[in-house]
Image (cartoon, coloured by chain):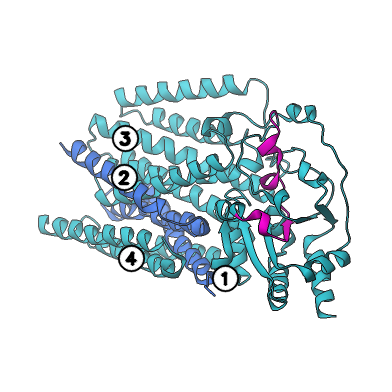
Chain colours: A cyan, B blue
Amino acid sequence: MENMEFTINAIYIACVVLFILGLKLLSHPSTARKGNTLSALGMLIAIVATLLDQNIISYQWIIVSIFLGSVIGAAMAKYVEMTKMPEMVSLLNGVGGLASLLVAFAVVISGEEIDTYILVIVLFAIAIGSITFTGSIIAWAKLSGEIPKLVSSAATVFKGQAIINFLIVVSIGLLGTLFVLSPENIDFIIYFSLLCLVLGVMLVLPIGGADMPVVISLLNSYSGLAACAAGFAINNNLLIVAGALVGASGIILTSVMCKAMNRSLSNVLFSGFKAATSSTIEIEGEMTPMVAEDAFFVLEAAQSVLVIPGYGMAVAQAQHAMKELQVLLEENDAEVVYGIHPVAGRMPGHMNVLLAEADVPYELLLEMDEVNARMEGFDIAIVIGANDVVNPAARDMQGSPIYGMPVINADLAKNVFILKRGMSSGFAGVDNPLFFKSNARMIFGDAKDTINTIIRQFSD
Amino acid sequence: MSVIYLSTILILAIFLGFELIRKVPATLHTPLMSGANAISGITLVGALVYAGGEFTVVTKVFACISVMLATINVVGGYLVTDRMLAMFKGK
């Protein structure tokens, strides 16, 4: 019996090593796939080793559960469109939170003798698990727009929200204390869990769609912390280490996203953009529209082209057409690179995955600082479905709601083409002076159609 | 003592996590997140003991649902990460 436990824990060490190596290999695109396989191998070994545990006496329900989970997971992974990755990650965050919540719940109702400190940790696991679960479901609803009647993608704010949230938090604290004092009363823990589930909804509702990269990253972190807390509750090293790695990953991504928007985490979580401040700024100049056919002549003469994608590229599914245009430009002896802002899209790295899907080599996907350093050298910057991340107001208009946010300085390129559906301002509702600059040309219409028109002219 | 021991492991793991993740390039941040989803499915290991042990039916039902959900994370997370990483090609 003790020998077995020793063996299982020894095997867990090997699993931890595999997880760590997996993350280490993720430091370069050429080794990343191997890293993921190592990590998956570690997980497989961990699961098999755990099944050897002699406390496990019946296997039929385990096998059914694992089978069902595998089928659902594999189907999701196989059929999800790359544009829908933010939704998928959001759902997986939620599923992970719910799994930790249920384990913690199983511990409470198992009837085992539980120390007081473990009770506190169990409460912690239930709280994080619940908030992650319902918070992620709301985030998913905002991203997918599947249930617009219930959850709008914009920030949902109502009167007295702060007071209600405060009351919920106080009640959660109260119920938690009552439960620790009398653990035999299951009612307390049930109401505690229900209130935590409500809190998850309340915390994500007031956050607007443009801030989703931060929220997904944060919930990603929570799903790890929930696993971590569950690990403390059942005295399991492997859960603690793996959960901590995930937690750290989510926290780093959250901070990268916040920095890229020049906002603090609390600002993202507790207040939206104030639309009123943007009206005080006068933008001089005129928008100059251009048709796709004229864009061709400028592109044909260009030596170096920078493409700046945004969420609009995903919506228009324009990445494949863009790759086609890239090949034509390269055959025409022009250099083409992509400049990717950290918060372009709806999750960290979203644009990179879409462009990789369209077979754009990863060497061409450059970060903001790299392209800004050589911006004056680009003959043309093509902005596809991006807006706030190229807004020069962030650089030189004090008082603009996005002042201070690091942006890609597309306006400093010799020519700027902006592929845009219509005249509307960006997701954040902030006017963009870039559109009024003398070197900027607006090409209105569906980005994919526009690029295809240019491609046709190249082949004529 | 066990709390101290587990907390030590937690602290070390967090620092290690920060060092590892810091080196992941921005271009791989989406696969990093889905890979993290898969790793957080480690809850499965905890759920298994309660799903197959000598416990009440309610406990086992909760644990079995948890096993299923965590498996979705593990299988879905690793497969979709692999699918994405396979698309990242060099020149």
Mark in the foreground, 2 or 1: 1
* Mark toward the start of the polypeptide (1 vs 4): 4
Amino acid type, callout 2: Phe
Residue identified by numbered label 4: A44
Q: Residue A174 versus residue A348: which sits nearer the camera? A: A348
How far is disc 1 from disc 4 in space, using C-alphas? 32 Å
Amino acid type, callout 4: Leu
Residue identified by numbered label 2: B15
- A57 relative to A133, above or below: below
How far is disc 4 from disc 3 in space, using C-alphas? 27 Å
- A56 relative to A185, above or below: below
Where residue A202 appears, x then y in whole percent?
58, 32
Q: Classify mark 1: residues with Cα within 10 Å, few (<14), some (14-19) or many (20+).
A: some
Q: Classify mark 4: residues with Cα within 10 Å, few (<14), some (14-19) or many (20+).
A: some
Is residue B87 toward the left or the right of residue A428 in the image? Answer: left
Element at label 2? helix
Element at label 4? helix
For the residues labelled 3 and 2, say whether their Cβ atoms are less than 8 Å apart.
Answer: no
Q: Are marks 3 and 1 on the same chain?
A: yes
Q: Residue A280 versus residue A222: which sits nearer the camera? A: A280
Q: Chain of mark 4?
A: A
**Residue A156 belongs to magenta span:** no
